[in-house]
Image (cartoon, rainbow, N blue to C red):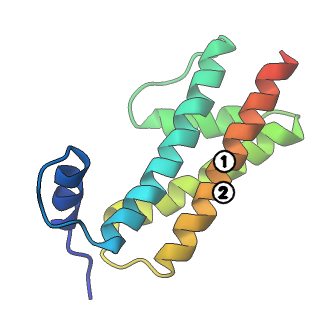
Amino acid sequence: MSFDWSEYLRLAQELVGQDVRPAGQEARLRAAISRAYYAAFCEARNCLLAEGRHLSTGHDVHRAVREEFTKSSDKMRRQISQNLDRLRNDRNKADYDDRVRRLADTAVADIELSRSVLEGLARLRQVE
């Protein structure tokens, strides 16, 4: 069965404290995947901006951030790029596909990947 996209509205209402029937687990898992990506992406983007890097704006900024980390000779930076790429792919599936296989497993894995990116970025900031 396809995802009922109206569940996102129910989740949004729930998040702002409106008294509604709680959103379904699938909406929660999809939102978790999306938020895990954006936690990692925004921290990575801000890290690059703090380093004085100039990034494109709009939707291209997602690719630009990954590319900045990919082209580095530093192994940790390249790993951050790989993790961001996987998180982005999973986020796109969660945000656009009617059916996503192994959704719960993906959500758990992406939370760990996001945590790994954040830890790597924290280490990079300590080195500077």
**For residue 107, side relative to residue 17 (left or right):** right
x%, y% of residue 4?
Answer: 20, 74
Residue 113 at x, y percent in the picture: 66, 54
Nearest the eye: 58 or 111: 111
Looking at numbered disc 2 in the image, what kind of residue is underneath it?
A: Glu
Picture quadrant of residue 25: bottom left
Q: Distance between the residues labelled 2 and 1?
A: 5 Å
Q: In this view, does 47 lie above or below 119?
A: above
Left or right? Give the position of 113 relative to 124: left
Q: Front-most of 71 and 103?
A: 103
Image quadrant holding the C terminus, namely top right
For disc 2, the marked residue is: 112
Work out whether residue 81 can be spotted: no
**Quarter of the view holding residue 118:** top right
Q: Who's the residue at 82% across and 21% down the image?
A: 126
Q: Is residue 43 visible?
A: yes
Find residue 107 and name its label: none
Name the residue that disc number 1 marks. 115
